[in-house]
Amino acid sequence: MDRGSARWVSMAVTGFGQLPVRQFRGVHHRYATIADMVSTFAWGDQKVYVAGHRGLVGSALVRALEAAGAGEVIGWSSAELDLRDRDATFDAISQARPDIVIDAAAKVGGIMANSTYPVEFLRDNALIQTNVMDAAHAIDVDRLLFLGSSCIYPRHATQPIRESSLMTGPLEPTNQAYAMAKISGIFYIEAHRTQYGRHWISAMPTNLYGPGDNFDLQSSHVLPAFIRRFHEAKVSGAASVTVWGTGAPRREFLHVDDLAAACLMLLEHYDSEQTINVGRGQDLPIRELAQTVADVVGFTGAIQWDASKPDGMPRKLLDTSRITELGWRPRISLRDGLASTYQWYLDTHA
Ligand SMILES: NC(=O)c1ccc[n+]([C@@H]2O[C@H](COP(=O)([O-])OP(=O)(O)OC[C@H]3O[C@@H](n4cnc5c(N)ncnc54)[C@H](OP(=O)(O)O)[C@@H]3O)[C@@H](O)[C@H]2O)c1
């Protein structure tokens, strides 16, 4: 990519109009671990809009951009700017005039929410991503990163899952609506590249965890649910914790600060219509994850497995050979990442 071209010259900012713009210059999160992972790209010249900046992924991106010395990082909460509202999205983005857009805004949820509200999961996510991309296109943003999710891949994709398996088979039915929206987002990126020559890219992260995670047991993913349940069992002195399934399925977990570092690297170096996987490249049985979380939390009771409950897919691991060929590697070990995530949970929830 030619960073000296006019496309990369930072645009003049003339003011933000009516809508308050949240700026994060100088905000340094004490859990940030990515300062040494970013390279010499001229981030100081860039004004970056992070859609979804308060979320698990978005807040890690803000930390990473701050650590990389981004010229300006901006964002709005969903209360300030509902990205489903096309006119409001166009107004905000055209007034703020970012150089780079990262779309980490999405309506996300677990199996129950996805299965109960497929209309909202498809419609809201299609609206959010289409509005963000159309508004970015309208002001000529040439660098945009769209974040999808590994659920876009077919249910029976060969493991580890390569990017080329996209659209080669039926999806997992429980999150089909969400996956369909994300797949259309990937193709919308491709379409802008083909039709308008934009240098837009998309990336597919594996399961993520870290500070900012969702610890609500009704909607949380397995890893934060383990942290909370083992913590509460430790505090109450419970002798055991019962967990769904056999513990045999294997899953992959990436710390969100590793993902954020990967996103910055991709914005610096990656320019292809092909989506790219971001993962650890290693998985572990849920049983081993549970024991590691219990060790980190200090829960010494028994972990009992309720094998009458569903296990889900036996394995879900991304093939990360493409991103590792670009020189990126995850830096945060599972145990270290769990320890800092548990500390964040204690600081914010306990
Ligand atoms: N978490 C994972 O394990 C994981 C794995 C793979 C991929 N991803 C992808 O990463 C992206 C972000 O996920 P996340 O885990 O960070 O989710 P999250 O923590 O729930 O954050 C989602 C963000 O989207 C914003 N948002 C939702 N609806 C909005 C709307 N109508 N208008 C404006 N903003 C809206 C929210 O804003 P407010 O907070 O202001 O309401 C929030 O900041 C998603 O595309 C997801 O598919 C996540």
Image (tube, rainbow, N blue to C red):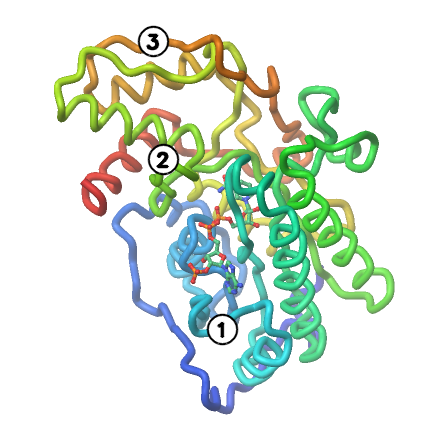
Which residue: 49% across, 15% down?
309
Numbered mark located on residue 217 in the image: 2
Residue 312 makes an appearance in the image: yes
**For the residues carrying marks 2 and 1, which lies nearer the camera in this image?**
2
Q: Earlier in the sequence, mark 2 or mark 1?
A: 1
Labels 3 & 1 near each other (Cβ < 8 A): no
Labels 3 & 2 near each other (Cβ < 8 A): no
Numbered mark located on residue 304 in the image: 3
Q: On screen, 151 above or below 294?
A: below
Mark 3–mark 1 Cα distance, whole angstroms, equals 45 Å
Beta carbon at label 3 within 8 Å of ligand 1: no
Q: Is residue 235 left or right of residue 195?
A: left
Beta carbon at label 1 within 8 Å of ligand 1: yes
User: In x, y percent, where is residue 135?
Assistant: 66, 74
Which residue: 75% across, 52% down?
184
Alpha-carbon neighbours of circle 2 within 10 Å: few (<14), some, or many (≥20)?
A: few
**For the residues carrying marks 3 and 1, which lies nearer the camera in this image?**
3
User: In x, y percent, where is residue 265?
Assistant: 56, 49
Residue type of the residue flagged with mark 2: Leu
